[in-house]
Amino acid sequence: MPDLGKYADAVLSSYAVTIVLLVALIGHSVWRGRRVRRQLAEIQARNGK
Amino acid sequence: MASLWQYANPQKFLAVSRAVLPFVAGGAAICLVVGLVWGFFFTPDDYKQGSTVKIIYLHVPAALMAINAWLMMLVASLIWLVRRHHVSALAAKAAAPIGITMTVIALVTGAIWGEPMWGTYWAWDPRLTSFLILFLFYLGYSALWQAIESPDAAADLTSVLCMVGSVFAILSRYAVNFWNQGLHQGASLSLDKEENVSDVFYLPLLVCIAGFILLFVALVLLRTQTEIRQRQLKALEARERMA
């Protein structure tokens, strides 16, 4: 871990906010993609496609 | 020779994007990990800004993508308005949440960086203000998609909103050149100067920017696939209800 000195809070909080937001965005995109794909497969199966 | 417009076919788009997505996502992951680890652990402090210079690896790529995501939405919206390709309208819709996230990251990291350097989290500086307005346009754009039931009408209206908002996307990029007032420094990256940022910071910054660009492309492909399937799903559900 590098010595961030008196700005440690600013640097670490910037990285924390960014990582949380990016992980949330990626997670939501993947989760929604899987959910819609599953629902589409189900309705296609019901309709015999 | 194959035409670009063949990808306007949803099935063709799904097939191609499925094949390309793992490579783009893998490239994004590699660039982000290498760039951020390099920048955070292996670059020195700046003689003026101390360790806060490490925020550059988040703030600059996020701000760049916030502006360019809107410009990508503008191009996709124009294609929709002129050629009525549904995939382009859905790609614009898919890009908006990514642009919102990038704008929030740029605003928050900028505020956190600004406090120790400027003595304030926020100032009504031309670049900051135009960025805030761009953020509000992003929110309005997404809200408009949700508010209108007819997909074609929603695509038409959001495309017009996107064109209006482009003024602020361009202002966000060039505000520091138009106005000599304000706290925000000049552009960190430009083609008209020999050096804006020292190489020791510049090289990992370029890797981070590549990572953010690839992440944006990967997420747009993934979310556009989802939007296409969502539309197919709605059509099938409507058919079921009518049967």
Image (spheres, coloured by chain):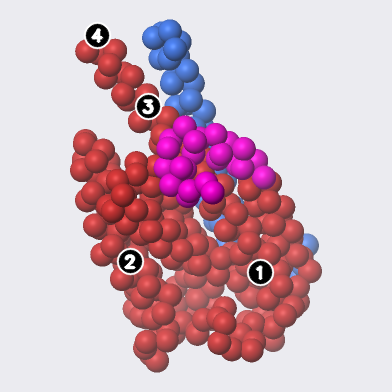
Numbered badge on residue B166: 2
Q: Which chain is blue?
A: A
**CA gap, disc 3 to disc 1?**
39 Å
Task: Name the residue rendered at 21%, 35% in the picture.
Answer: B149
Image mark 3: chain: B
Q: Which circle marks residue B243 in the picture?
A: 4
In the displayed structure image, the side of residue B9 where residue B42 appears, left or right: right
Label 4 SS = loop
Q: CA distance from mark 1 to mark 2?
A: 25 Å
Locate residue B221, reporting x and y percent: 51, 44
Same subunit: marks 3 and 1: yes
Q: Which chain is red?
A: B
Secondary element at tag 2: helix
Q: Quadrant of residue B213?
A: bottom right
Disc nearer the start of the sequence (1/2): 2
Circles 3 and 1: CB atoms closer than 8 Å: no
* Residue B142 visible in the displayed image: no
Q: Which residue is mark 1?
A: B206
Question: Disc 2 residue type?
Answer: Ser
> Residue B232 bears which disc, if any?
3
Q: Which mark is residue B225?
A: none
First-in-chain label (1 vs 4): 1
Q: Residues within 10 Å of mark 3 (few under 14, many from 20)?
A: some
Q: CA distance from mark 1 to mark 4?
A: 55 Å
